[in-house]
Image: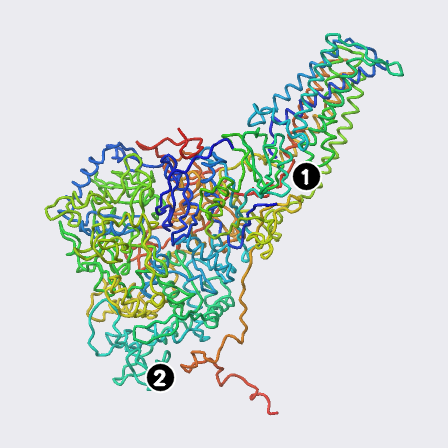
């Protein structure tokens, strides 16, 4: 059984929001659209987005980490939003595990959004139905697109390729390997929702320089006769003992 | 959570309707066993109409919660998994039974179907009453479970939610029944007042228990689990939108903690001691006005209680929506 | 999902311009409406990715802020009020060409053309030069000219278009003063790959955002002290012997002998042999080394010789000399890590560790590529080697008055580590490297400005000595912005930030017409915004505007358009032809020259006209020589026709586009015009990419093969090696002039001290000029800005999607600093400098060093501007820091720009401020506020609900 998902690599996400607007751009004119914006030129512009990049500060100066954190529907393996839906508008596809909303069945009761601990669903204030990330289901199977383009818009856009896409049930897929080898983790595991999307943590590269590596035999100062050595006048054992 | 008035009215109004119906059938059952004097069928008919009125009003209120009320019929589909779907089935079923119950009394079409060994008659209204009672309790369970089943809304995820919906709905219905009795069947007033007192005190115990429980809750989710970074100090700087979003509108009450505390004390006052005082006064003076006031005060209190019920619930998604910049 | 999938009907390729990065894009159209813009996977720059801005192009295209008609200020209305009436293009052209013809016939310098965007300079520069005005520049002077000048005067190349870090092979990457970048998507791609390959990434920045967020180590630094840090690192690298001696000897002027005879006119200059040399714009190879074997002076690069880098020697005539490297060592002797710690706030141990990481990585992780090449002295090398330490820097270093020297220090550090144009280090991009300095020069006399004649020289150039300055006999500036004068001699990008102030004051003179293209000089692109707005609207005693006529060409209703007398509606990038030309700023890759084009995918909106067409039309009407035939009639039908057929000189074979030249498109760089050139670009992803042979891809400063190829292709005139200037004779020449030595021009008395101080041939550290003139007890905090990634280098907060991400801005303050000032999150506060104050909201942060406050720039807008509602958060909650930044320094020796004294780079980040909570009861609204702008004629209505579906029937 296939479970499509995103793996988001926080190690390289610079928080550029490319995934945010490329998603909106694709989907507003796509099957999931429109994604309405209220007061787009007014005081508090607010619109439907399937994906957001948030920013957190971890720790205290000067050891602060700034974490950019993209968040969209996690396509849980046990999606709590699905069983609560009274109409069956909210469903999880058996064939690929994508959690979708059938706009024609949705009554806009918002109950699914209450049932999602991640805040991944929102009501489109124009269409009055619940909307969410579809993993660009109208792209990924579209055979009129070149094969490289059959990916969610956010994945294609991401300049740091921080968004990997694939089948997390296939142990040999890029995403499964990334989860396995780079410490992929789910969000809020305490609720047993088993999110299909995973996040990869920051990884630090450190450089350790041993003191004895600093000076080499071919130190250029030697060529110019200036290799640092202690002045003869500096104290030495000769000053204090005669054995 | 953001308290939606549609849901506040829905749950409180149908609670009154359910409680009132239970009050009516309680009397009819007592009367069947001759524990209470028989009532004129108009009492039941009028009472049922009143209960139905509350149920209809609640139903209408619920439509304001929907983006697509014209598709509301679809919501019966998933009764196997969704408490909301179950509620959607049980509520009209209950309304239908209440209607039939009232209609049977009103039209006098109440043939005897059987007689119990004890000699108590089993009429059509008795069958409808039993059915209505089952459905009324089922409805309390459905309504309560809509909230109680959401396991990460920890304030709600407790049997107390169902118990309190039941007790508070029942109490409010019995308050109304007491006032109704004062107007139409004075001999029932004290009976109802007694049950009202019992239900209200039980509700007080239940609600106080949930308040105490919730005050001691430790959120299971933290920013650490929300973003998966293990550090005691994580502060949000930006949530990705500055002009607000569904996430900031639907899940936040937007009021201060002080106001929340005030509302709590207001509802505790309005739902419990004040109406009970009015009840005592009303019964003592046989004043239907005081008893109606008791009901009204408690209903107002229940609106506050329900507002508080929603506002107090902390959705874990709020962890992701703490700050803008 | 009730909306049926619309069939994608058309996909057109062009080049993005939501910022200056210039990615290849595919524009998907449905029924003529833009449905989706994604990255072009076949484009070398962005390889298919796209950023937040590029993905929001639709909202730019259909923005209600767009101008659609030429507009004339209503008679009797004030500038700034934004009251206009629509006129026809014919009226606009007549009005403008009559006015400009008069100016050109009398005094061409009274016309000034300044452009905010600098990717059209091939044409805008040509127009200005043909017109005959010296008063032309793009925005580089207030952006990052220090980065260009500091690097190019040192290594003959610079970051961004002209070069960058080779992160494919680097092992250690150090980024200074950069959060987001011009070269945004390519850098993002590269950093990500670099990190995944296990490279170590260190970010030095007062603030941890953007790229710094994912750095392995963040080194917080106090703004304006980067020079101190870099000099201390150089100190440590030299003290430990961690420099690449072989590289320094052969490829830099480290070993060249400097005259130490203070009495000589040649003091501080390199010793030269008597060998006669051809004169030209290059570094003749006639300098001397002190050979270690023979212990005698020899001509540099003499086979079998190896110079001393350290020591002092005496020539036979008694002249004392030292290798340049000796002087550098002496210079940094006192710049110890402990000294730098006090200035930068970075612990000395960290500075040392950084130096060791750089030095040891460069030395011990050397890369060797099996690429044979021949250097300029004929020596054949079997391999190309590289020391894998890469750097990147941008405005954080540049936008300080000491930025030039900080950046010189950076370029020198990169050279000490032996990382120039080598794998894993810094790599050039064509047309760089160029001689130091590049050959282009401005005229050096006011006589070059003649009525009805093109300017006799370039409006911008690269002075090599005092005689190259563009000044009159008294040493006074010829240009309105005083560029290339003794005040800012190496202001190679001009000083756009002083144009309005200078013109208003009439210093050096009054002008008549100011044409501004795509620059918001009445808002976020100017310093001292509130005062500059007054200047734009100021009149003299006769009631005449001090700047008599202002023309603004822009696609949007910016704050600046409100001050125009004439507004010309530009198209968006989706509606026009453009070239990313080798004559300007191409998009070359490390492996060879690349230029590219924009091809319209949509017809112009309303009456919008691309600015290029406006210039060609004006040029034709004014009969500027290149735009008309001999008989004075129109030569070019339109801009595409111009691009196809224009040659820099008749028959030169060099035009705006380098690809597919020659009759059949078979030639590159040089060849006859090809009538099908546009088609060929269109068929090839709008890009021409000339990949160099591998042996030409590295060491290009000294790569004989490359330099000769470059010369044959006419990228350069000379094929001489470009030695790195650790020690800058150019700077020394100015210093000598200030000391009264030599036969060159001498600075005016009041500037002598300034020139002598700041034209130091070796980098040195000084407190930024404004800081020197500030009571830092009263104003203790540095205040800096940066643009967020979702808006970097873009000019549209009105974008319906992007503004939801940043609708207003806060002042970020280190949490401890804020608490000490009694400031909490969301408090309204005053930010005050010696120049002015701004009211804004505070946000506490742990990701900023305690002595710095910062905000996102250009989020704040004037009420009603960009056709946002008057109560938009941009104008009520958002703010501009520009109000507390001055374009001039406190009056001392006359008025002088708040700029780097060498390059005229606007010193945005030198301002010092204090912060305090507002008094109780003050309005919760940003201050200052300005009169609300109303929509102009021709602007579309702003919707309160936007449900965009491309191609949906309206």
Residue C587: x %, y % from top left: 34, 55
Q: Nearer the viewer, residue C354 or C339?
A: C354
Q: CA distance from mark 2 to mark 1?
A: 81 Å
Q: How many numbered tags mark residues here? A: 2
Return the residue found at the far left. Answer: C631
Residue C923: x %, y % from top left: 46, 37
Q: Report which quarter residue C866 is drawn in.
A: top left
Dot 1: chain letter: B
Dot 2: chain letter: C
Q: Is residue C424 above or below residue C576?
A: below
Query: Is A5 positioned to the left or the right of C790 in the image?
Result: right
Task: Confirm whether residue C285 shows in the render.
Answer: yes
| Badge 2 element | loop
**Please, which colouring scheme is shown?**
rainbow
* Label 2 crowd bin: few (<14), some (14–19), many (20+), radius 10 Å: some
Point 70% across, 32% down: residue: B145
Reading the image, the residue beneath label 2 is C292
Residue C813: x %, y % from top left: 49, 50
**Which mark is on residue B151?**
1
Q: Nearer the viewer, residue C548 or A21?
A: A21
Residue B321: x %, y % from top left: 56, 42
Q: Nearer the viewer, residue A166 or C268?
A: A166
Q: Report which quarter residue B119 is drawn in.
A: top right
Return the residue found at the far right. Answer: B118
| Badge 1 element | loop
Q: Nearer the viewer, residue C695 or B57?
A: C695
């Amino acid at each position: 059984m296939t479970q499509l998902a995103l793996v988001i690599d926080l190690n390289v996400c610079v928080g550029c929001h490319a995934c945010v607007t490329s998603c909106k751009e694709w989907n507003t004119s796509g099957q999931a659209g429109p994604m309405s914006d209220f007061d787009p030129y007014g005081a508090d512009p607010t619109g439907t987005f399937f994906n957001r990049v948030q920013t957190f500060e971890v720790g205290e100066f000067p050891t602060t980490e700034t974490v950019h954190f993209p968040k969209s529907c996690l396509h849980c393996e046990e999606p709590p939003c699905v069983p609560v839906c009274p109409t069956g508008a909210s469903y999880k596809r058996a064939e690929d595990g994508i959690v979708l909303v059938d706009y024609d069945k949705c009554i806009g009761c918002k109950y699914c959004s209450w049932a999602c601990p991640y805040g991944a669903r929102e009501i489109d204030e124009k269409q009055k139905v619940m909307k969410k990330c579809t993993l660009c289901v109208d792209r990924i199977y579209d055979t009129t697109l070149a094969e490289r383009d059959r990916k969610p818009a956010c994945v294609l856009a991401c300049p740091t390729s921080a968004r990997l896409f694939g089948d997390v049930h296939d142990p040999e897929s890029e995403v499964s390997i990334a989860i396995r080898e780079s410490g992929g983790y789910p969000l809020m595991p305490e609720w047993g929702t088993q999110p299909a999307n995973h996040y990869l943590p920051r990884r630090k590269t450190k450089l350790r320089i041993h003191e004895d590596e600093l000076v080499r035999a071919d130190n250029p100062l030697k060529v110019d006769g200036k290799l640092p050595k202690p002045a003869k006048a500096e104290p030495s054992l000769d000053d204090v003992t005669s054995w | 959570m953001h308290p939606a008035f549609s849901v506040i009215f829905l749950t409180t109004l149908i609670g009154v309707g359910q409680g009132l119906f239970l009050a009516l059938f309680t009397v009819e059952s007592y009367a069947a066993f001759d524990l209470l004097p028989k009532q004129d069928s108009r009492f039941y008919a009028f009472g049922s109409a009143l209960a139905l009125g509350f149920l209809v009003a609640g139903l209408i209120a619920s439509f304001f919660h929907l983006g697509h009320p014209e598709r509301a019929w679809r919501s019966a589909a998933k009764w196997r998994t969704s408490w909301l779907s179950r509620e959607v089935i049980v509520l009209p079923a209950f309304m239908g039974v209440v209607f039939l119950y009232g209609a049977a009394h009103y039209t006098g079409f109440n043939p005897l179907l059987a007689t119990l060994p004890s000699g108590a008659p089993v009429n059509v209204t008795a069958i409808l009453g039993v059915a209505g009672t089952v459905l009324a309790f089922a409805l309390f369970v459905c309504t309560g479970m809509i909230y109680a089943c959401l396991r990460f809304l920890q304030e709600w995820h407790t049997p107390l939610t169902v118990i309190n919906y039941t007790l508070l709905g029942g109490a409010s219905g019995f308050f109304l029944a007491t006032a109704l009795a004062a107007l139409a069947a004075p001999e029932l007033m004290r009976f109802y007042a007694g049950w009202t007192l019992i239900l209200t005190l039980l509700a007080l115990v239940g609600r106080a228990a949930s308040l105490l429980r919730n005050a001691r809750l430790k959120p299971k989710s933290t920013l650490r689990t929300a973003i998966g970074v293990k550090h005691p100090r994580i502060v949000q700087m930006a949530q990705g939108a500055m002009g607000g979003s569904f996430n900031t509108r639907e899940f936040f009450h937007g009021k201060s903690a002080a106001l929340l505390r005030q509302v709590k004390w207001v509802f505790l006052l309005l739902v419990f001691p004040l109406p009970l005082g009015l009840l005592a006064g009303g019964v003592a003076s046989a004043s239907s006005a005081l008893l109606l006031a008791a009901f009204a005060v408690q209903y107002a209190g229940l609106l506050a209680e329900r507002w508080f019920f929603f506002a107090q619930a902390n959705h874990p998604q709020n962890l992701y929506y703490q700050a803008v910049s | 999902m009730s909306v049926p999938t619309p069939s994608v009907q058309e996909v057109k390729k062009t080049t993005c311009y939501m910022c200056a990065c210039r990615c290849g894009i595919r524009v998907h159209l449905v029924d003529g409406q833009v449905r989706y813009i994604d990255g072009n996977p076949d484009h070398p720059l962005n390889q298919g990715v796209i950023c937040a801005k590029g993905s929001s192009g639709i909202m730019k295209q259909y923005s209600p802020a767009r101008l659609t008609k030429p507009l004339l200020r209503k008679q009797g209305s004030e500038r700034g009020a934004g009251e206009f009436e629509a006129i026809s293009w014919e009226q606009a052209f007549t009005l403008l060409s009559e006015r400009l013809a008069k100016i050109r016939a009398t005094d061409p310098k009274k016309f000034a053309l300044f452009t905010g965007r600098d990717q059209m300079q091939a044409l805008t520069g040509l127009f200005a030069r043909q017109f005959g005005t010296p008063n032309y520049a793009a925005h580089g002077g207030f952006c990052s000219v220090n980065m260009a000048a500091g690097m190019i005067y040192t290594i003959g190349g610079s970051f961004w278009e002209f070069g960058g870090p080779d992160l494919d092979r680097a092992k250690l990457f150090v980024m200074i003063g950069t959060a987001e970048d011009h070269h945004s998507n390519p850098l993002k791609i590269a950093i990500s790959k670099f990190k995944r390959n296990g490279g170590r990434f260190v970010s030095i920045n007062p603030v941890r955002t953007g790229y710094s967020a994912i750095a392995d180590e963040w080194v917080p630094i106090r703004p304006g002290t980067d020079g101190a840090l870099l000099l201390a690192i150089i100190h440590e690298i030299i003290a430990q012997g961690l420099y690449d001696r072989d590289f320094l000897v052969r490829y830099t002027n480290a070993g060249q002998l400097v005259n130490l005879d203070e009495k000589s006119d040649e003091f501080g200059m390199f010793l030269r042999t008597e060998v006669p040399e051809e004169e030209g714009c290059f570094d003749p190879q006639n300098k001397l080394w002190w050979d270690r074997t023979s212990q005698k002076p020899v001509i540099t690069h003499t086979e079998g010789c190896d110079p001393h880098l350290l020591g002092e020697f005496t020539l036979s005539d008694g002249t004392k000399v030292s290798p340049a490297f000796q002087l550098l060592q002496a210079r940094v002797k006192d710049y110890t890590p402990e000294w730098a710690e006090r200035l930068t706030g970075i612990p000395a141990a960290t500075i040392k560790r950084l130096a060791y990481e750089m030095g040891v990585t460069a030395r011990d992780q050397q890369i060797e590529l099996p690429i044979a090449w021949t250097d300029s002295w004929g020596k054949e090398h079997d391999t190309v080697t590289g020391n894998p330490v890469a750097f990147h820097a941008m405005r954080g270093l540049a936008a300080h008055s000491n930025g030039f020297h900080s950046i010189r220090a950076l370029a020198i550090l990169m050279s000490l580590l032996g990382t120039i144009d080598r794998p894993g280090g810094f790599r050039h991009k064509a047309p760089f490297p160029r001689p130091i300095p590049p050959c282009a020069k401005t005229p050096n006399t006011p006589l070059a400005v003649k009525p009805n004649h093109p300017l006799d020289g370039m409006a911008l150039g690269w002075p090599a000595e005092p005689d190259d300055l563009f000044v009159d006999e008294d040493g006074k500036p010829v240009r309105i912005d005083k560029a290339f004068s003794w005040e800012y001699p190496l202001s190679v990008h001009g000083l756009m930030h002083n144009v309005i102030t200078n013109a208003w004051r009439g210093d050096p003179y009054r002008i008549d017409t100011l044409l501004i293209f795509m620059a918001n000089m009445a808002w976020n692109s100017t310093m001292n915004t509130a005062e500059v707005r007054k200047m734009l609207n100021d009149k003299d005693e006769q009631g005449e505007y001090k700047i008599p006529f202002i023309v603004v060409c822009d696609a949007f209703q910016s704050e600046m358009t409100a001050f125009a007398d004439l507004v010309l509606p530009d198209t968006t990038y989706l509606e026009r032809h453009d070239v990313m030309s080798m004559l300007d700023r191409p998009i070359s890759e490390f492996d060879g020259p690349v230029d590219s084009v924009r091809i319209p995918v949509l017809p112009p909106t309303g009456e919008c006209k691309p600015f290029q067409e406006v210039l060609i039309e004006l040029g034709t009407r004014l009969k500027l020589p290149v735009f008309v035939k001999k008989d004075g009639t129109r030569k070019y039908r339109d801009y595409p026709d111009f691009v196809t057929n224009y040659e820099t000189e008749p028959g030169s074979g060099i035009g705006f586009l380098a690809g597919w030249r020659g009759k059949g498109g078979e030639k590159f760089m040089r060849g006859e015009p090809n009538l099908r050139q546009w088609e060929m670009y269109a068929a090839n992803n709008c890009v021409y990419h000339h990949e160099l042979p591998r042996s030409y891809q590295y060491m290009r400063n000294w790569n004989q093969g490359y330099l000769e190829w470059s010369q044959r292709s006419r990228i350069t005139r000379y094929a001489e090696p470009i030695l790195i200037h650790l020690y800058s004779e150019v700077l020394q020449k100015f210093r000598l002039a200030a000391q009264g030595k030599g036969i060159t021009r001498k600075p005016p008395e009041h500037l002598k001290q300034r020139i002598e101080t700041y034209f130091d041939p070796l980098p040195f550290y000084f407190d930024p000029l404004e800081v020197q003139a500030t009571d830092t007890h009263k104003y203790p905090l540095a205040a800096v800005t940066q643009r967020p990634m979702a808006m970097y280098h873009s000019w549209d907060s009105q974008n319906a999607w992007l503004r939801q991400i940043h609708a207003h801005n806060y002042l970020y303050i280190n949490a401890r600093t804020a608490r000490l000032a009694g400031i909490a999150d969301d408090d309204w506060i005053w930010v005050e400098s010696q120049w002015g104050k701004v009211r804004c909201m505070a946000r506490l942060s742990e990701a900023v060093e305690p002595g710095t406050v910062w905000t996102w720039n250009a989020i704040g807008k004037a009420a009603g501007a960009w056709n946002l509602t008057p109560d938009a958060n941009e104008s009520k909650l958002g703010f501009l820091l520009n109000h507390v930044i001055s374009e001039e320094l406190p009056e001392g020796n006359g008025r002088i720009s708040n700029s780097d004294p060498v390059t005229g780079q606007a010193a945005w980040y030198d301002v010092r401020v204090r912060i305090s909570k507002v008094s109780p009861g003050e309005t919760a609204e940003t201050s200052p506020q300005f009169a609300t702008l109303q929509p102009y004629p021709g602007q579309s209505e702003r919707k309160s609900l936007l449900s965009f579906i491309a191609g949906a029937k309206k």
